[in-house]
Image: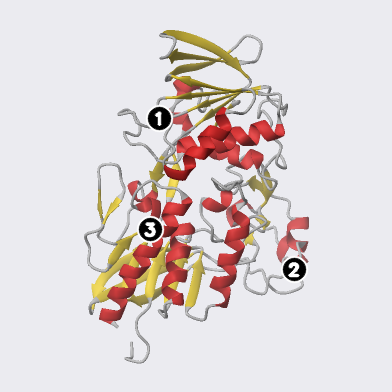
Amino acid sequence: MSATRPRPLLVVGAGIAGITATLEAAEAGHEVVLVEREPAVGGRAIRSHHYFPKLCPPSCGMELNTRRLERNPRVRVITGATVTACRESNGGREVTVARTPAFVNDRCTLCGACSAVCPAKVKDPFNLGMAEVPAIRLPHPYAWPKRFVLDRDACPAGCRKCAEACTYDAIDLDAKPTQETIEAAAVVVATGWNPYPIDKLPELGGGVLADVIANVQMERLAAPAGPTGGKILRPSDGKPPTRVAFVQCAGSRDTNHLPYCSAVCCLATLKQAIYVHEQLPEAEITIFYIDRRTPGRNEDMLTRVAELKGVHFVKGKVGSVVAGADGSLVLKAEDVELGRIVETRVDLVVLATGMVPNLKSDETPFGLLRDEDGFGVEGAAGVIVAGVARRPEDVAATTRDATGAAAKACMVTGRSA
């Protein structure tokens, strides 16, 4: 790189942490390359119905951020890409980025002609597999870049209907993977998280009973762009539940699953209890908890939910969820305050599953150390960890953390330019 054009900062992961780090660094005057493996930016945050504590949709804030990304000449965004190699080079990092085939290119106008004729259906990843969508489609209503994507493996043999329907030459069914090398001054790792799989909790009905869902699924059920158009319905029969149970620490703070607290689950449940109460005001809502952790100003949300009609808090750990003879779900739990085991019948169970860092399962080339739970520990020079890749936290804390990561990266970038 020439002295007049310093090496860029590389940010890996375009969730709220990666986007924040990118914008903070770019608006401070640094060149930034943002790499995201999904076809659109936004990560887990954009899948939420509402943020807490204000209960506003994340699409608003994300739209502001994507406009900033789009308009900043110092930012380059690469979607559908992963980092496959990273090595130290001249005080910085030489990074190899592999891109999946671009079956739909920048000439896409979102006209939808291709999707209208597509004969193939796939499970919708944005809605966590709870609905089906055409193999070629916009990833979700808030997607940026605004470009259709194609699940090529789902195409029937020899089918070219989408390409034939496109009048803009935006579809290349023979596209191939590509690769490039980026000389980066520093790297911010913001690879985010996945929810703990509920099928690892069969004793709580996870993966066994249709009407036992995870908290991330409840977010999609309540969202207007979700699989039910925003209606909270039982997966088994499509009916609205009249009795809903939230099970806190489902697999968390448990040495058999996740030994740590994910920090946001209590607040997520309180938020979702509000969803249920606002949409189904006559529903009975029971929240089973070990502790209620709502630090700082978030304590107000706990007070608000506790005052809602039909909401009950039970201090005690749920031991089992089984199917009842009448189609209900039967929870057996300890009630610490009553000093006995109780049984509760409900129509829908929501498991508050914790955050698992993607770093735990993803092999990364950054030379990062990881703690016993899989969260990144900074150690490699010029590699900074941000957001839930580093520790469990909510969106507000993540943006603060990512801002700090951007500041660290900018210092390294300035030294290695």
Residue 228 vertical position relative to residue 90 in the rendered view, above or below: above
Of the residues tagged 1 and 3, which is closer to the observer? 3
Distance from label 1 to label 3 (Cα)? Answer: 26 Å
Instruction: Find the distance from the CA under tag 3 to the CA under tag 2.
Output: 43 Å
- Crowd around label 3: few <14 · some 14–19 · many ≥20 (10 Å): many
Which of the two labelled residues, at mark 2 and mark 1, occupies the earlier sequence position?
Answer: 2
What percent of the width, then of the height, locates residue 119?
Answer: 73, 51
Say left or right for 82 vs 142.
left
- Badges 3 and 2: C-beta atoms under 8 Å apart? no
Q: Looking at the image, can residue 230 be seen?
A: yes
Res 401 label: 3
Q: Depth check: give the residue in front, 272 or 200.
A: 272
Secondary structure of residue under mark 3 = helix
Marker disc for residue 410: none
Q: CA distance from mark 2 to mark 1?
A: 47 Å
Q: Amino acid at mark 1?
A: Gly
| Residue 166 numbered tag | 2
The residue positioned 69% from the left and 50% from the top of the image is 120
Nearer to us: label 2 or label 1: 1
Screen quadrant of the C terminus: bottom left
Question: For the residue labelled by badge 1, is the local secondary structure a helix, a strand or a loop?
Answer: loop
The image shows a total of numbered marks equal to 3
Q: Residue at x 44, y 29 (%)?
A: 250
Q: Position of residue 393 (x, y in %)?
A: 41, 47
Which residue appears at 40% of the width and 9% of the height?
Answer: 339
**Mark 1 — residue?**
251
Q: Amino acid at mark 3?
A: Asp
Q: Which residue occupies 30% across, 67% down?
A: 86
Q: Are marks 2 and 1 in contact (CB under 8 Å)?
A: no
- Which of disc 2 and disc 3 is earlier in sequence? 2
User: Which one is closest to the eye, mark 3 or mark 2?
Assistant: 3
Q: Would residue 102 be visible to someone looking at this image?
A: no
